[in-house]
Image: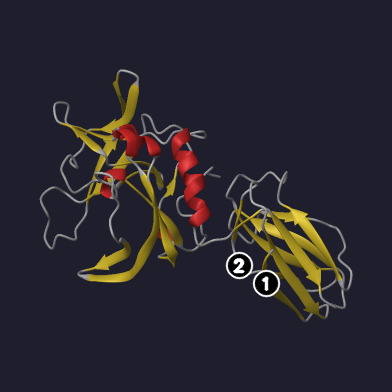
Amino acid sequence: MERFKILENEHYVEMLLTAAHCVYSEGSYPAGSSFIWQMNGNTAKEIVAVSHIFVPKKYIETGDTQYDYAICVLNKCAGDAREAYHVLDYNIKSPLGSETVTIGYPGEPIGDSSTMYCSRSRITEYKDGDKKWWAVDNGLAARGASGGPWVVDRKAVGVNSAFHDELKLVRSPQFSREFEDLYKTAVQRAPTPVISKLKLINDYGWFVAKLWFHHGGKKEGEQFQDHTHILINSEYEVSLENKGLLDFTIVSIHADVVWGIGKSGCEKFLYDPGSSKGACYSISGLTRNNELKYKGLY
């Protein structure tokens, strides 16, 4: 599982990765930005406004392309995450030496100007003193490709950032600790709520309930089971800490009903150990005919 996912929600896109110079220049951000989800000719499937833009402090202070990345947060979920690229966790695997597909718009437009270009290259490392970047030799070394992803096994490992004229290389910043810190700041503004606990109330349900939860964005295969009995007209809270979850893992509740039919909540949340908030649910009814309701954050 990735430590951080730019596309957090199981079904929708919430945050975008791009190059910092695409959204920040000379001390200012764009007055307004939108995310266009797929083009069919000149028609967009969906257009969603960007609510927040996060750029590394070191890029703002120095303009150093080692930090030429940015995270844009949408004002609502959009698109389809199954068609998008998550960000590779370098703690699990370094992209150095991997073959990557780089994507972007060419310097000279093709056809209707909406056509993107891709090139396949192997990732090397470019160094200048104590500074370092990922580098590829490809056909995107032209204005217009900035911010496009470098993709390895459906994971984004870099973005088109700067062009080295003499060596004819395209460079990308390396996603270091600063990137992870920026992500943790940006995710607080994402549409999916951030929590550290779950609560289930047995609201006069004629059964014994248990509070379980799904994690990793899936309803099957990844489930934490707590076997504490929640009797009629009582409640129980589960802390998500020390459950083996990575920060900002997607979680959702499942109310298990003993000798009956359990229910799973439709809502998705992000686990953050630093959050003080929790999600509260109630379950009522009969053993095989019950209702699970989301009551809100607390």
> Quick one: 75 or 266, which is closer to the camera?
75
For image coordinates 60% across by 59% down, the residue present is: 269
The residues bearing labels 2 and 1 have C-alpha atoms spaced at a distance of 8 Å
Where is residue 154? Give x, y as percent.
40, 48
Looking at the image, residue 242 lies above or below residue 97: below
Residue 191 lies left or right of residue 249; in this view the side is: left
Where is residue 187? Give x, y as percent.
50, 52
Amino acid type of the residue tagged 2 in the rendering: Glu
- Regarding residue 245, the answer to whether it shows in the image is yes
- Regarding residue 99, the answer to whether it shows in the image is no
Label 2: few (<14), some (14–19) or many (≥20) C-alpha neighbours in 10 Å: few
For image coordinates 72% across by 46% down, the residue present is: 243
Quadrant the N terminus occupies: top right
Give the quarter of the image for residue 157.
top left
Which circle marks residue 294 in the picture?
1
Give the quarter of the image for residue 120.
top left
What secondary structure is found at the residue carrying circle 2? loop
Residue 266 lies left or right of residue 31; in this view the side is: right
Where is residue 90? Give x, y as percent.
47, 35
Label 1: few (<14), some (14–19) or many (≥20) C-alpha neighbours in 10 Å: some
For image coordinates 12% across by 56% down, the residue present is: 110
Q: Name the residue under label 2.
A: 267
Looking at the image, residue 21 lies above or below residue 65: below
Do the CB atoms of the residues marked 2 and 1 lie less than 8 Å apart? yes
What secondary structure is found at the residue carrying circle 1? strand
Residue 85 lies left or right of residue 24; in this view the side is: right
Looking at the image, residue 99 lies above or below residue 27: above
Amino acid type of the residue tagged 1 in the rendering: Tyr
Looking at the image, residue 87 lies above or below residue 257: above
Which circle marks residue 180 in the picture?
none
The mark nearer the N terminus, 2 or 1, is: 2
